[in-house]
Image (spheres, grey):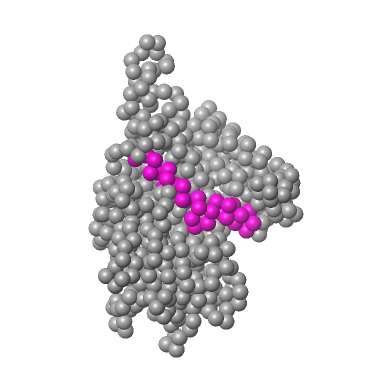
Amino acid sequence: MNNYQAPLRDMRFVIHELVGSSPICALPAYADCDAGLIDAVLEEAGRFAGDILSPLNPVGDRDGARWQTGADGKGEVRTAAGFADAYRHFAEGGWMALPCPPEFDGQGLPRLLAVAVSEMWKSANLSFSHVVTLTHGAIEALLIAGSDAMKATWLPKLVSGEWTGTMNITEPQAGSDLAAINCKAVPQADGSYRISGQKIFITYGDHDMAANIVHLVLARTPDAPPGVKGLSLFIVPKFILDADGKQGEHNDVYCTSIEHKLGVHGSPTTTLVHGDHGGSTGYLIGELGRGLEIMFVMMNSARLSVGTEGLGVAQRAWQLASEYAKERVQGTDVTQKGGKSVAIVRHPDVRRMLMTQRAHTEAIRALAYSVAALQDIAHQSDDAEARAAAHRRVELLTPVLKGWSTESAVELTSLAIQVFGGMGFVEETGISQYMRDARITPIYEGTTAIQAADLAGRKLTRDRGAVLATLLADMRADQAALAGAGDANLTDIATRLAAGLDDLHAASETLITRMGSNPAAALVVAEPFLKLAGTVIGGWLMAKAAKVAHDAIAAGSSDPFYREKLASAQFYASHILPKSAGLRITVESDNSLLLGLPDEAF
């Protein structure tokens, strides 16, 4: 198996030509950023991902992280061989700091660039990338809610990567039902809190890659009200800092076990016990009772990152399937009688499977990068109206990206195994790891059903679909421009896109009405609606990409990339986008019989 090769040409196309790096680099915070810097960072990240992280991916899958008893008699985690050294190089290279604010020693580069770099980490080694995702989430939560003193203490070393972060939410009795969290936080005379309780499914809750681990823990104080309004958020470091900010004694938080999982074996999923020996020391972030509100900052950051995970894993699986199809000789060319044996890439169905993977992945990339650019505008534009509009669209698209990308990754990695045939089902080729790794992505940081309920129950109904209506208007304007371009291929794409836009509009009207009259009936079809939205929005972005490619060719470009982009856009329009019609039928269906069945029927 060859090492990962970053798809730099397509990344640059989406960043510079489809989304547009110029308006992003023109934002006040990014005055020192330009296309040349973006390309240089992409190239260097691609080398690190391919040369350092990719070779460790099968090692992490094969050997995994392991739990052991430490010198103090308590549990600790050791990562797979090479992970700690790779992380040291990662931190020294400044990669953790790339999107972080300069005032805390970050590089302050655009999120549009950061998401492309993140895609590389996730393609090359998804298990390794988890420590980056959680640390960035902790950084964002502290930026939003931490006091000045807290920021000064914790952020510089999180930004540098010297320390890493975690998100401590889930408990044995409290998975998605956060109201059931009962981890306790008892106030102390010195202003700190004593934390006690058990947290499970904590990614990188313990490891040997960084000097300290900064846990962000949801807990409730003794007099807190029941439910989510009683939850507060606390910093609980693995090692307590002394008065000078230096690492001191081990806090009373220990890893008692790690999970044995279907995939992402290199990423330790831990059980942490706080307070078995008197209580771990924690420090309140923000105000009491606002823990969940702050944690959602971290969760939304993680959801966008997991959406990029779907992209990264799908990209790598397609890359491997493509390489195999060009090397594996089997059968003869059906277009020639009595022809010689050919590589399977010549077989029509294999070409269909490969192009399905390619076109679908390209659409996901276009959506992920578009959301990142909107984040840049929402955070950095000096136009208040532009910031607000971008923020509303990011909120709408976050569950779509997370849900559609990850569900697609499961399908696309399965399709990659199909290209390998029987060899894909055995571990020797390595392709099976990507399907196993992909399977967690529609589950953690909010399942697809949770993303769909968020889209239907919050993002659509709170404004009666107003934000979606503005997006639909933009998509229809681009569709009209495509239809009027005077090219038969673009006209065909535009026609199919128009049908998809009609499906999305009609389905959204149905869903909004049902959320008002019969929420249960709406939630039955919320997930198909999310997939419909992703499919159509992906089709719109691929149509825009086709127009850019067409214009480049018309201007005299001989770069074969543009013709390939036209081909993948046409394929998406004819093979993937038409699924919107079936999804619309599903959303509009009457599910009263389903809802009326007794529980015993299931």
- Residue 516, given in percent of the width and then of the height, sits at 72, 56
Q: Residue at x 39, y 66 (%)?
A: 256
Q: Which one is in front, 122 or 21?
A: 122
Classify residue 21 as left or right of residue 490.
Answer: left
The image shows a total of numbered marks equal to 0
Report if residue 340 is visible in the image: yes
Q: Is residue 229 magenta?
A: no
Q: Residue at x 43, y 33 (%)?
A: 418
Residue bounds of the magenta highlight: 430-459
Classify residue 462 as left or right of residue 340.
Answer: right
Image quarter of the N terminus: top left
Classify residue 410 as left or right of residue 40.
Answer: right
Taking 516 as reference, is 169 above or below it? below
Q: Which one is in front, 137 or 181?
A: 181
Dominant secondary structure (helix, strand or loop) of the stretch shown in magenta: helix
- Residue 141, given in percent of the width and then of the height, sits at 45, 68
Q: Which residue is drawn at 42% across and 45% down?
A: 436
- Residue 138, given in percent of the width and then of the height, sits at 42, 66
Taking 75 as reference, is 551 above or below it? above
Q: Which residue is drawn at 61% across and 74% down?
A: 226
Report if residue 557 is visible in the image: no
Q: Is residue 450 magenta?
A: yes
Residue 326 location, quadrant: top left
